[in-house]
Image (spheres, grey):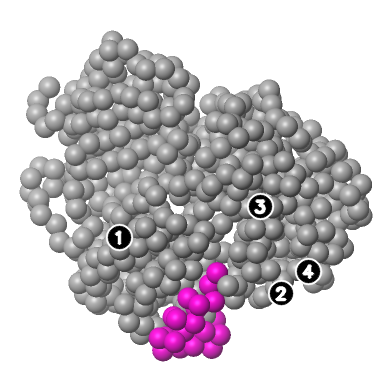
Amino acid sequence: MQKLTSSELRTQYLNFFKNHGHAVIGSASLIPENDPTVLFTTAGMHPLEPYLMGEKHPLGKRLVNVQKCVRTGDIDEVGDATHCTFFEMLGNWSLGDYFKKESIHFSYDFLVNVLKINPKDLAVSVFEGDGDSPRDVDSAGYWVSEGLSPEQVYFLPKKNNWWGPAGLTGPCGPDTEIFIDTKKPKCSPDCSPACDCGKFIEIWNNVFMQYNKTAEGKFVPLDNKNVDTGMGLERTICILNGYKSVYETDLFIDAIKLIGSEASAKYGESEEATRAIRIIADHMRTATFIIGDERGVTPGNIDQGYVLRRLIRRAIRYARKLSIRVSTLWELAELYVGQYANVYGELERNKAGIISEIKKEIEKFEKTLNGGLKEFEKVAAITTGVIDGAAAFRLYDTFGFPVEITEELAKDKGLTVDRAGFDAAFVSHQQKSQAGAEQKFKGGLHDHLDETTRLHTATHLLQAALRRVLGEGVFQRGSNITAERLRFDFSFGRPMTSDEISETEKIVNDVIKAEIDIVLEEMSVEEAKNKGALGVFESKYGEIVKVYTIGGFSKEICGGPHAKNTRELGVFKIEKEQSSSSGVRRIRAVLINGEL
Ligand code: SER
């Protein structure tokens, strides 16, 4: 195997595909703009969706890039050898050009002839077939003609060998995944790449996008068959160099050393210390990239800002555990900016903002952290089993503890948190504050919470109204809420007429006037899909999702929070409707306090 640094692997990958006719494109923003409703860009294919759906790409039919990605679905796994919340994905695409045979050939050629991986160390999986798509005997055959033995090819079900769509609808298809076989003995006779015993480590995924999944759940063949591949940079560097974890790669090693030099327990000294140091290194890298992004966000209470807040606050908590000065956290951000400046110039340009936002967030949380930890200890001491929702809410509201941090603290003590109770306390508090009983909040979490909450609910009403006025082809493509206004991007191919705009406003205002309760339920993703909920899947949510229903009018998977009743919203007004990008329109709207 070639021992490569991260920058060598980026270059070798881009050059290989460039030499095979692929145009090199830059990394898109981490915050999706014209994308299905995910909080972050989670794969190189996200920003390319319109082209995977058939739109012509200006640079042609073969593309390659290195994409910044954030996935927080596995946040609890961070600290092990391979999981990170931020990672770089090496990807190559065929937009209706080559298909399975060439894609498999390129992958084999790159792995075996460029990276010098012994083909005997590879294993691949292919789709075993079901009612939606046939058994992928073609891909299996191509792997064998490249040089793998049939024993290295595993047929696996949809659960393992199908990718997408990224949201509810969009391009998807069977994939073939490529693994390094560590040659550890099989853990059981059934051991396969689907098994997480550690024998097989996934490095690359080639998706054969041949279907568009519709809102009705149908798989409609795409006119153009595409290839979408993704290889994890961190994992591949780790494997090529024979490291035990991604934290030993050049991407992390300086950060680990910096944290280690400050920490009361040393890296490698115990599993607990190693994990804590890795979590700090991972979370501060992700925070640096989210704030420093060309469409960067700052810590806040909803959506991307809330994820960022959780990451920074979690890093602060672990820094405390290891008696690390909190200034180390912004020193880490400085280190990452310098380390990545050549590849991601936006970090250097936004450096001052990155450091000041991290400092501000630390200051906010530090004010209440000690008090919160004491309060938690008190609560834990009198709790057996489940911490009640009201106590978790107090930790959130008064001490700025994201409920996920309380859950984590609880887990260390063998306790759990009543999440439904927390949500109920949250909603009831909002209602009280809405009534003016409590307008001022302690801690940092409640900045403009009422305004953003009401606008958030208005966004759900707007999406449902647009689908009534313009048709079911309308889906959210992005959303951005400040205390003053909402901004909503949606798929639609032409400007709206003024009649359509007034009709949409009227429908939303009619629902507001109807004084409908907003109902929150928790259910599995499958159940939500079956009930026709719109929304975001994959990285943003766990297995169980929250579904907000507004009468028979709107049903969306959403993290919340929302108003309790539509009457809280006041009067809805669309201020502007304009183009956002090809096939995507943008609405700016406000809520005006007052009677209808
Ligand atoms: N979209 C696929 C993935 O994320 C391949 O890039 O695995």
User: Which mark is nearer the camera, 4 or 2?
Assistant: 4
Question: Would you name the residue on which mark 2 appears?
Answer: 242
Q: Secondary structure at mark 3?
A: helix
Residue range of the region highlighted in magenta in the rendering: 251-272
User: Which mark is nearer the camera, 3 or 1?
Assistant: 3
- If you read the primary sequence from the N terminus, does the residue marked by circle 3 or circle 2 appear first? 3
Q: Residue 471, image x and y in percent?
A: 43, 17
- Report, in whole angstroms, how far the alpha carbon at label 4 lies from the one at label 3: 18 Å
Image point (44%, 80%), residue name: 259
- Report, in whole angstroms, how far the alpha carbon at label 3 lies from the one at label 2: 23 Å
Q: Secondary structure at mark 2?
A: loop
Q: Nearer the viewer, residue 25 or 261?
A: 25
Question: Would you name the residue on which mark 1 appears?
Answer: 353
- Report, in whole angstroms, how far the alpha carbon at label 3 lies from the one at label 1: 31 Å
User: Which mark is nearer the camera, 3 or 2?
Assistant: 3
Q: Residue 137, image x and y in percent?
A: 85, 39
215 with respect to 211 (left or right): left
Query: Label 2 amino acid?
Result: Gly
Tell me the quarter of the picture where residue 376 sits: bottom left
Image quarter of the C terminus: top left
Q: Secondary structure at mark 1?
A: helix
Query: Label 3 amino acid?
Result: Leu
